[in-house]
Amino acid sequence: MIRSRLSYARYYLRILTLLLPACAYYIALQMRFRFNLFFPRSAPSRLPSYWAIMLLTTIVWAITTDAFRRLAG
């Protein structure tokens, strides 16, 4: 019972760790375009470059955390 709970906790922490770059980009986009904290101008109609950067960063982050887990474990 305790092992299954620890397994679920480890699983959810792993998902949270892998989603950190996506959360960071979401917060940055909200600060940049919704609140206009940096430059007072309107948001562009399409954001393809932000999605590509977010996807690339998430993939690199997932590979790096998996490699570090194997080296440390």
Image (cartoon, helix red, strand yellow):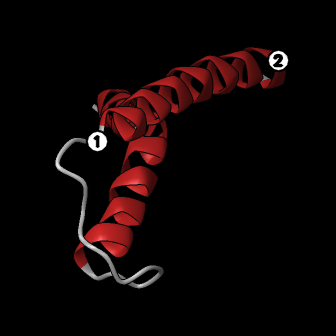
What quarter of the picture does the N terminus occupy? top left
Helix, strand or loop at mark 1: loop
Residue at image coords 48%, 81%: 38
Place of residue 9 in the rendered image (x, y in percent of width and height, measured from the top left)? 36, 40
CA neighbours of label 1 inside 10 A, class few (<14), some (14 to 19), many (20+): few
Q: Residue at x 38, y 70 (%)?
A: 32
Residue pointed to by mark 1: 47
Question: In which quadrant of the rendered view does residue 31 lie?
Answer: bottom left
Residue at horizontal 33 percent and vertical 55 percent from the top = 26
C-alpha distance separating marks 1 and 2: 36 Å
Quadrant holding the C terminus:
top right
Find residue 30 and report its horizontal and vertical position in percent. 29, 68
Residue under the point 42% across and 63% down: 28
> Vertically, is 65 above or below 22?
above
The kind of secondary structure element at disc 2 is helix
Q: Quadrant of residue 40?
A: bottom left
**Residue, disc 2:** 71
Closest to the camera, between mark 1 and mark 2, is 1
The amino acid beneath tag 2 is: Leu
